[in-house]
Amino acid sequence: MYQEGRYKELVALVPFSPANPPELDLYRGLALARLERWPEARSALEAGRAKAPRDERFLVELAGVDYKTRHYDRAKTELRQALVLKPGDEYARNFLATIYLLTRNLGAALENWNKIGKPRITTVTTEPTPKLRDQIIQRAFAFSPLSTLRLSQLRTTEARLDNLDLYPRYHFDLMPDSAGSYSVDFVSVERNGFGASKLEALASIFRDLPLAVDPEYYNLHGAGINLLSYFRWDQNKRRVRASVSMPIEQDPGLRMGLYADARNENWNLSRTFRGATEPLAGLNMERIEFGPELRSVVNGRWTWQANLLYAYRRFRDVQNVEPADAYFFTDGGSLEYRMRTDYQLFDSPERRLTLSSDAQGSFGKNFAAGLGGFGTIEGSLELRWFPQASGDDYQTTLHFRAGRAFGPATLDQLYELGIEQDNNLWVRGIAGTRHGVKGNAPLGREFVLWNWETDKTVYNNPFFNIQVGPFVDIGRITDPSGVFGSPGWLWDPGLQCRFRIFGDIVVLVSYGRDLHRGSGAFYETTSR
């Protein structure tokens, strides 16, 4: 009767009864689903599943009912349970991958499809057409037409695109064709020139007003050459920075650059330096550094970076410092080699959970008399979770970092735990500056830092996005000399708001409370 399409007759012939064998419950549920009587179909299938819990067909058909009624999360759970009972069920695997694709989780779709040798792709298109040269963009794609698209190829492609620093937002769409294959469409927002429009260019260049400007020119001549600069005329933190970077031999996975950075900064160390007979409040430091760098994408899990830098620093108004601690303020040059490697330890597209790591170190020499060799070693773990089936709502990040410097170090070579635009070890309840002068945050050669934050999207459109959420920063910093370091563990909860403009420019506003000091810090910064 079911095969002949006599669904109403079947339902009338097989009324609901606890005494029905599982097979009759299955056909009753299937017939009710054909009649789009969804609640009754679910009841019949659940009754049969209770009688035959090891029969995966009930879970697959329940997923079909939930798919039709748009209960996608429940359908995915049922299909995963069915695949536990019968891992080789190709229909269930394909069904699950299709739902993931429908809910815009391409990684999870590929993770399931790849287990059954799918999906086969026929064409690769771009929307809109990139201004980046065809040879570069094609080499960024680790997959090609008339082949099976693998999750590992997608991750490698994403890593190469990120290495170009041209695509703040992009995604890949898979569009099915009549033959059961798919076309891949690369949809992106590409950085070009100063901006896509005069308004975007002005917003980018002048985003740090009133004290700084950021002239940045991307994708020169379509060759992936980026020219970035930064000019800050703050009377206490003057800074000029410039860099140029480009792919090597049009390879998006291999990028080289040159940079130069000069600063003139006023420091007040009266709260953070204990090696002076009187508070060291009027220190001035000049520093210039420059050098080459190289970044390489090995694959979607592994990247590395190396750079060589020469730096020269000079200190003024160093008064009342104990002779044993005077080396922190020694004029002179240094040569340093740095190496960093990033590796993704865990990637679960279905759970939208990743665990990434990085390790970095350096060794070098201070040429000033009495200093000599020095080095650093650092490591981090970052857990990132998107609890929703799609989008970035409630994005949660947990980041652990630790580092240590070896050998004599000057002030500019110390770590800092605080929130300040020239520092990336944020403890958001401690301002790095006081009345605009650096030195308010604790410094040292050894640190441990945990950062946790969750961001809720409260408004979103193609040009403007707002995320709000809490954070907690926990850290400690020490120094073998005893004259720097925090008095104990720092516990700093707070709230932050992130505005994203044109999908590229990010304005971050935060307020953190330092529970140890009993004070707070309000901070605003803009970045791309």
Image: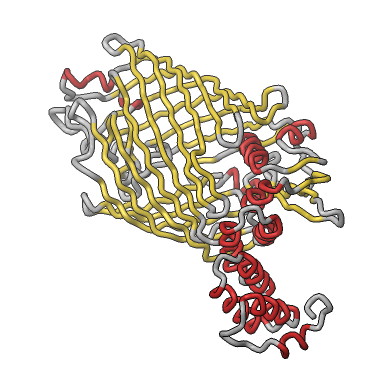
Using the rendered image of the protein, determine whether residue 198 is visible from the camera's viewpoint: no
Report the residue at 43% width, 17% height from top.
Answer: 336
Using the rendered image of the protein, determine whether residue 472 is visible from the camera's viewpoint: yes
Q: Nearer the viewer, residue 484 or 187?
A: 187
Residue 391 higher or lower than 235, as above or below: below
Q: Quadrant of the C terminus?
A: top right
Name of the residue lying farthest toward the right: 178
Percent of width and height locating residue 274: 17, 32
Q: Nearer the viewer, residue 447 or 460?
A: 447
Q: Toward which corner of the image does residue 381 lie, by quadrant?
A: top left
Q: Is residue 340 left or right of residue 17?
A: left
Q: Is residue 137 left or right of residue 25?
A: right
Residue 216 higher or lower than 332, as above or below: below
Percent of width and height locating residue 439: 29, 36
Q: Nearer the viewer, residue 460 or 73?
A: 73
Percent of width and height locating residue 185: 76, 49
Q: Quadrant of the N terminus?
A: bottom right
Report the residue at 61% width, 79% height from top.
Answer: 21
Residue 195 higher or lower than 26, as above or below: above
